[in-house]
Image (spheres, rainbow, N blue to C red):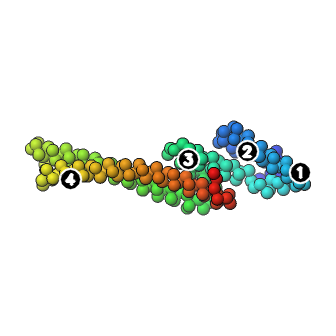
């Protein structure tokens, strides 16, 4: 759909961004676009020409939405916010399916594997510790370790390793979260033709 008037352009932009941006931010953005039209018309350009030079309001709205959601994820860390930021950034271009979605899936899978391994080691180590103690007391009906005393120390080691993996997963998640925000900001900047979105 080719827009030919300022009023149509502003209306479509407003419709796409209502409920996404805070009202004050939306009003400022619409005011900026209205000012752009005012200056352009003062310089003898037609509204149709200005609409064309600004790009489609749908594309502008997608970029503004992605930028807003990335900033929101940056200021309020949560799985939901980073997920929404990634999804909004995917909508900016087809190549983002490779350059945003694939790294995101790989990182989430890596963190899930680290966390699950940590849980498995911690649970197995704890269970082995209990059986080692039962073995020492002569209560266990079967032996996990040939030497129950060595089994106690080995079980503590396995449990500790599992807990370390869980803690490492937590810190890696925080690191990758911050790195992911920087990457999404860079990606939006590349699409806009700027280096940074602030």
Residue annotated with mark 3: 74
- Label at residue 168: none
Circle 2: element type: helix
Report the Cα–Cα distance between label 2 and label 1. Answer: 20 Å
Residue 186 horizontal/vertical position (percent): 60, 57
Residue 92 left/right relative to 160? right
Residue annotated with mark 1: 42
Report the Cα–Cα distance between label 1 and label 4. Answer: 80 Å
Q: Of the two numbered discs 1 and 4 on the same chain, state the one appearing first in sequence.
A: 1
Question: Is residue 165 positioned above or below 17 on the image?
Answer: below
Residue annotated with mark 4: 154
- Label at residue 29: 2
Question: Is residue 11 positioned above or below 184 on the image?
Answer: above
Of residues 127 and 192, the one nearer the viewer is 192
Q: Of the two numbered discs 4 and 2 on the same chain, state the one appearing first in sequence.
A: 2
- Picture quadrant of residue 52: bottom right
Q: Is residue 118 visible?
A: no
Q: Residues within 10 Å of mark 1 (few under 14, many from 20)?
A: few
Circle 1: element type: helix
Q: Please give the name of the residue rendered at 54% of the width and 57% of the height, measured from the top-left corner.
A: 101
Circle 4: element type: helix
Of residues 2 and 121, the one nearer the viewer is 121
Report the Cα–Cα distance between label 3 and label 1. Answer: 39 Å
Circles 4, 2 touching at the beta carbon (< 8 Å)? no
Residue 23 left/right relative to 77? right
């Amino acid at each position: 759909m080719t827009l030919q008037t300022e009023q149509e352009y502003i209306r479509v932009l407003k419709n796409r961004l209502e409920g996404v941006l805070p009202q004050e931010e939306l009003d400022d953005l619409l005011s900026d676009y209205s000012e752009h039209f005012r200056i352009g018309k003062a310089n003898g350009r037609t509204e149709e020409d200005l609409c064309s030079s600004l790009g489609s309001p749908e594309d502008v709205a997608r970029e503004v939405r992605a930028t807003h959601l990335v900033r929101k994820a940056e200021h309020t860390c949560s799985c939901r916010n980073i997920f929404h930021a990634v999804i909004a950034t995917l909508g900016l271009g087809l190549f983002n399916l490779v350059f945003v979605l694939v790294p995101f899936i790989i990182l989430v899978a890596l963190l899930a594997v680290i966390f699950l391994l940590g849980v498995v080691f911690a649970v197995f180590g704890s269970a082995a510790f209990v059986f080692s103690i039962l073995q020492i007391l002569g209560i266990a009906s079967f032996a996990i370790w040939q030497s129950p005393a060595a089994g106690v120390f080995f079980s503590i080691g396995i449990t500790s390793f599992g807990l370390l993996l869980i803690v490492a997963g937590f810190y890696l998640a925080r690191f990758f979260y911050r790195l992911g925000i920087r990457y999404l900001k860079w990606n939006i900047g590349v699409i806009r033709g700027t280096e940074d979105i602030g």
